[in-house]
Amino acid sequence: MLLALDIGNTNIVAGLFSGPKLVTRWRAATVRDRMVDEWWALLTTLAQAEGYRLTLIQAVAIASVVPALTMTFRELARTRLGCEPVIINGELNFGLPILVDYPREVGADRLCNAVAAFELFGGPAIVIDFGTATTFDVIDEHGAYLGGAIAPGLTVSLDALVQRASRLIGIELKAPPRAIGKNTIESMQVGTVLGYAELVRGLLQRIQAELPKPARIVSTGGLGQLITPLVPDIERYEPDLTLIGIRLIHERLTHTS
């Protein structure tokens, strides 16, 4: 079995694969100072609750944007599972031409999304990942990574607004019934949720205008369920896209090594 780890700034998502099948996934808050033994205890508890044993894991692949935790989980794989993990980055050759100025700067999760999107949907394609940041990643018709955009995430934007405006409070993130808010909460939902959907639509239009052919558009990430229905251009929401990309890259690297 393969343990795929998507280590983000807000959450860590762990996926357990049996061959190409994702059999289960777990999500935990990103805690940077948690030690190897603590992560092992947490993963063991989560696995046992679903009837799995971590000792069945034969390989580990990691896509991380948190360097400290990359080292922590590398040590966990070595000491607890007895295997050398694959650490995904832009300097590895896994069949994705990365046509940007500095390939090593592209987040591992974005590379995984690009690989998975092209594998599942072909190209050209645009992937929108709604996480701590919202990223747009563009793949051409031949499967090359062209670059993209990074915007502040929806919750980051809302948190900044609440912190800077003393009369505003935290709100539930949901689509309001109209664009003219009738109270403070509705008005904030209009500006954050509907306003964010328009940000996405506007960037998609600009990106599409720079491509020679119309691209298929897929979304992922924790907030994708909220925004995707508000953006008609998005064809599909795939919550496990990053984990699928981790598995695909691991397969490519281990089969060619």
Image (spheres, grey):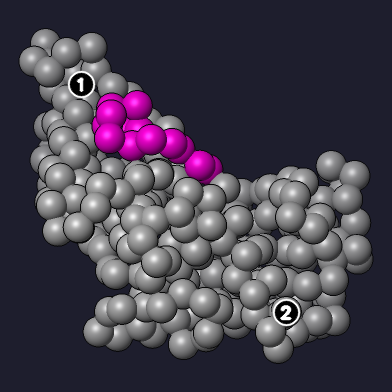
Picture residue at 34% right of the left edge, 56% below the top: 124
Label 2, secondary structure: give it.
helix
Q: Does residue 176 sit above or below 168 in this rendering? A: above
Badge 2 amino acid: His
Residue under label 2: 255
Q: Is residue 238 magenta?
A: yes
Q: Is residue 174 magenta?
A: no
Q: Position of residue 167 (x, y in %)?
A: 12, 32
Picture residue at 91% right of the left edge, 66% below the top: 55
- Residue 225: quarter of image: top left
Q: Position of residue 125 (x, y in %)?
A: 36, 53
Q: Categorize mark 2 by other alpha carbons within 10 Å: few (<14), some (14-19), many (20+).
A: few
Query: Which quadrant is home to the N terminus?
Result: bottom right
Residue 185, labelled with which disc?
A: 1
Picture residue at 84% right of the left edge, 75% below the top: 81
Taking the image as shown, residue 223 lies to the left or right of residue 86, namely left
Q: Does residue 152 sit above or below 68 in this rendering? A: above
Badge 1 amino acid: Ile
Name the front one of labels 1 and 2.
2
Query: Which quadrant is home to the C terminus?
Result: bottom right
Label 1, secondary structure: give it.
helix
Foreground pick, 246 / 256: 256
Q: Report if residue 163 is visible in the image.
A: no
Q: Categorize mark 1 by other alpha carbons within 10 Å: few (<14), some (14-19), many (20+).
A: some
